[in-house]
Image (tube, rainbow, N blue to C red):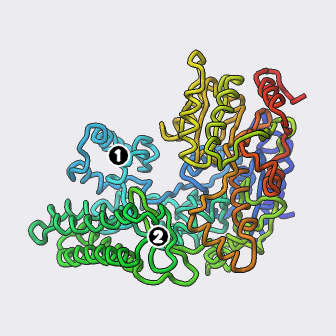
Amino acid sequence: MSQVVAAVEAVFGDAGALAQSVPEYLPRVGQIQMAHAVAETMETGGILVVEAGTGIGKTYAYLVPSLLSGHKVLISTATKALQDQLFGRDIPAVIAMLKSPARVALLKGRSSYLCLHRLTNARHDGMLQTAAPLRLLGQVEQWAVSTRFGDVAEVPALEESAQVLPLVTSTRENCGASKCPRYTDCFLYKARRDAMNADMVVINHHLFFADANVRESGVAELLPTVNTVVFDEAHQLNDIGVQFLGRQWSTGQALALGRDVVFRGAQCARGLADWPHLVEQMEMAVVALHAMFTEQGGAQQRALWALGVPDGLSPAIWTSRMVRFVDTIQTLTMALQGVCDAHTDLRTLFERASALLEQVERALLPVQDGLIRWVESGARLRCVESPMDISEAMQAKVVSGGGVDSLKSWVFTSATLGVGNDLDWFLASSGLQDAACLRIPSPFNYSQQAALYVPKSFALPSSQQHSSAVAALVAQSAQVLGGHTMVLTTTLRAMRHIADSIRKLLPEHLDIRVIVQGEASKRDLLNHFQSKHGSGLILVGSATFWEGVDIAGRALQLLVIDKIPFAPPDDPLLRARCAKVEVEGGSSFNEVQLPIAGIALKQGVGRLIRRESDRGVLVVCDPRLRTMAYGRKLLSALPAMRPLSEEAQYYAGLGELTKASTTDWS
């Protein structure tokens, strides 16, 4: 046993540093097993994939060996919120416990940092006309004087402001880099310098993959200096990675470019071109592109683009309008080229226009082999060309080492990496088939802590009555518990319908409120729910509420999931992956759709039981879990909760939760 492995095991022992620092600490076999495996991988090198069930304590299981190894470690998480939690809470706690001298840095994408140069211009560019955003801009100006890191998360209202945020942060396209007059004070480049000098750096998956394409996030420079990379919440790697491994452009980029050209042209190149007219022509071309998706009934909101044009669009109309759009960008680019030497900002605008022109022109060319292309229509038109998964990129960067000789070990971990008895879907999509794998079940006693109810006589998800039936069940159940309820839906439409219906069904004299995703920030909704201990509250959410929600204790006693979370059938990546499997003679349903749905379902279910003392009931309002073979397979992959077969049993189970002394389901 190596010295590091022995030191790690000592930390997790009965009299170790954890037991001395955390009063409620009890050694967990699974946590020690994972920490041991991580330490050995860091010592010997290689790739380790760990599925660690909820409650294992996987964060400490990789942080302790990381800090004791003496390695420079890069930790990547799924979201900025998890980054902040690691950097602000978990890592400082472990450092204090181990008395480690490690230097830690937090590195985010450029849009997370205040741009001092753009802040200087924000008040004078005329983009903010109403009182509320102008007041927020004033708060940002005051904060800018005292902030150390310039992280917009320090001003929650700014992080959530669609109006002010883009005016005071930069993009790759509008950043002047070393040519910027505020470069020496730049928060982004300070963060990158800090990362280069740190022993442990916390990033997110978006940032990691950004470098695989544009090499601009600072991670490419950082990677050769680290010995170990740990990916937490690794189940999100594939979906996040494909966003960055290809190319994309949007009409939003064109409109933002146009706004900046009009403003900077008037300031720095007045009279040298008719800037408003040039931008107006481009904006009219954008309007014409958008109009196609309402003019032609066959067009989809997310359309594959396999045969030269997006599905459902007329090839002749699409091509003519795209050529017009390209021509307007080209004309604007040529005008900027003629004046770009006059000012740094004009040079930046020329480079932005040139890059956008190159990307849009690609849309008139055939799709390259191995890539898929699709278009998303909505408030903006977004065109994406990407690989179907991250396997090739990860093979090059991880399995072969990507030419980074000093990078010795890679650790991938999550509570949900597979369905059934294997991790095949995750390993194949990530190109990690040869990795060492470890699956550690949750230490929670689910048969004692949780019960599962799948209503027998219930509307099928395909029925128009399904959401109303879900709302009726929630309204009646929440009255038994006095709130303490969260509802997870698979679509925003279902979320809104269910929330509205619950509000109508709840008796007025009861003090039970429904709070819904979108009515406030996720952070504020969860803080409110937890501050009230769930009393009198029903929280209804979709999308991000399926993950990253940690509500412990009596606050959350009832979790209702509306249906099996199959991916939307119009998802272009899903369609392409399914088509590939079918061509190769496989079953796209069993090999693609079912694993994705199973992992998502396990993530949602994981919101219910977060501590050994938690008690709760899970309801999945989808009879297919009982009646279909694939449903029973999904059900068998969930923790072994006590089944509630009949409605009477279900309400009896809810009644037990109202008793403070409840310790079992007997």
Residue that badge 2 annotates: 312
Picture residue at 41% right of the left edge, 50% below the top: 150
The answer for how far apart the CA atoms under marks 1 and 2 are is 48 Å
| Quarter of the figure with residue 140 | top left
Q: Are marks 1 and 2 in contact (CB under 8 Å)?
A: no
Position in image of residue 398 (x %, y %): 66, 74
Element assignment for label 1:
helix
Picture residue at 64% right of the left edge, 48% below the top: 547
Picture residue at 38% right of the left edge, 48% below the top: 162
| Quarter of the figure with residue 504 | top right
Asked if 93 appears above or below 298 in the picture, the reply is: above
Q: Let me know if residue 595 appears in the view.
A: yes
- Mark 1, Cα crowd under 10 Å, few <14 / some 14-19 / many 20+, is some
Say which of 78 and 178 sits in front: 78
Q: Seen in the image, is 548 located left or right of residue 35?
A: left
Q: In the displayed orientation, state which residue is furthest to the left.
A: 271
Position in image of residue 441 (x %, y %): 83, 51
Choose mark 1 or mark 2, whichever is in front.
2
Element assignment for label 2:
loop
Say which of 565 and 128 sits in front: 565
Position in image of residue 146 (x %, y %): 37, 43
- Mark 2, Cα crowd under 10 Å, few <14 / some 14-19 / many 20+, is some
Q: Seen in the image, is 83 located left or right of residue 458?
A: left
Q: Quadrant of the N terminus?
A: bottom right
Residue that badge 1 annotates: 144
Residue type at tag 2 = Gly
Asked if 375 appears above or below 638 in the picture, the reply is: below
Mark positioned earlier in the residue sequence (1 or 2): 1
Q: Seen in the image, is 474 located left or right of residue 160?
A: right
Say which of 43 and 257 sits in front: 257
Residue type at tag 1 = Ala
Q: Quadrant of the C terminus?
A: top right
